[in-house]
Image: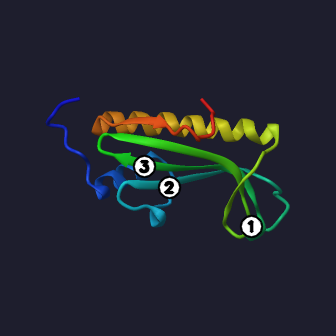
Amino acid sequence: MSEVTKLPTHYRLLSTLRAVGPYLREVQCRDGFYLFDCLSVCVDEKKSPEEREFWGWWLELEQNQHHCVAKYHIGLYNDVGDWVPCEISAAALKEVKRTQEAFHTKLTDTLSDKFEMTVELHSDSCEFV
């Protein structure tokens, strides 16, 4: 890594992370902490949209200088808008992991290319890759 590589500001990093995909929860982000989530699989499509629940993942990304730690979780996004960690069906898990892997690859490539930043998985992160 070059000594002249500057750390991105919170707002520059936020702008870059926004471009990675639709998963950034900007309102819940703060300097050095970024929250993402993905509603991968609808649990019951027969319910009205405001009552639907989803299987998916969420990510807590913490930045420290040119290094980020990614802590992924898998679970249920319930009808009141909260994530609940839980086991999910094998059929749903396949799609959740697919979206998670695609996102993680794009995230790590973008941070590396734009800012020479590395991303490692937290020891408590759900394994998917």
How dense is the environment of label 3, judged by Cα within 10 Å: few (below 14), some, or many (20 and up)?
A: some
| Residue sticking out furthest to the front | 123
Mark 1: secondary structure: loop
- Is residue 22 found left or right of 119 in the rendered image? right
Disc 3/disc 1 C-alpha distance (Å): 27 Å
Q: Residues within 10 Å of mark 1 (few under 14, many from 20)?
A: few
Q: Nearer the viewer, residue 47 or 14?
A: 14
The residue singled out by tag 1 in the image is 79
Total numbered labels placed on residues in the image: 3
**Which callout, 3 or 1, points to the residue nearer the camera?**
3
Q: Which structural element holds mark 2?
A: strand
How far from the left and from the top, in percent, is residue 46?
A: 85, 61
Of labels 1 and 2, the one closer to you: 2
What colour scheme was applied to this rendering of the protein? rainbow
Residue on which the image places disc 2: 35
Q: Earlier in the sequence, mark 1 or mark 2?
A: 2
Badge number at residue 62 = 3
Image x and y of residue 31, in percent: 35, 59
Answer with mark 3 or mark 2, whichever residue precedes in sequence.
Answer: 2
Q: Residue at x 49, y 33 (%)?
A: 105
Query: Is 24 placed above or below 92 here?
Result: below
Q: Residue 112: which quarter of the image?
A: top left
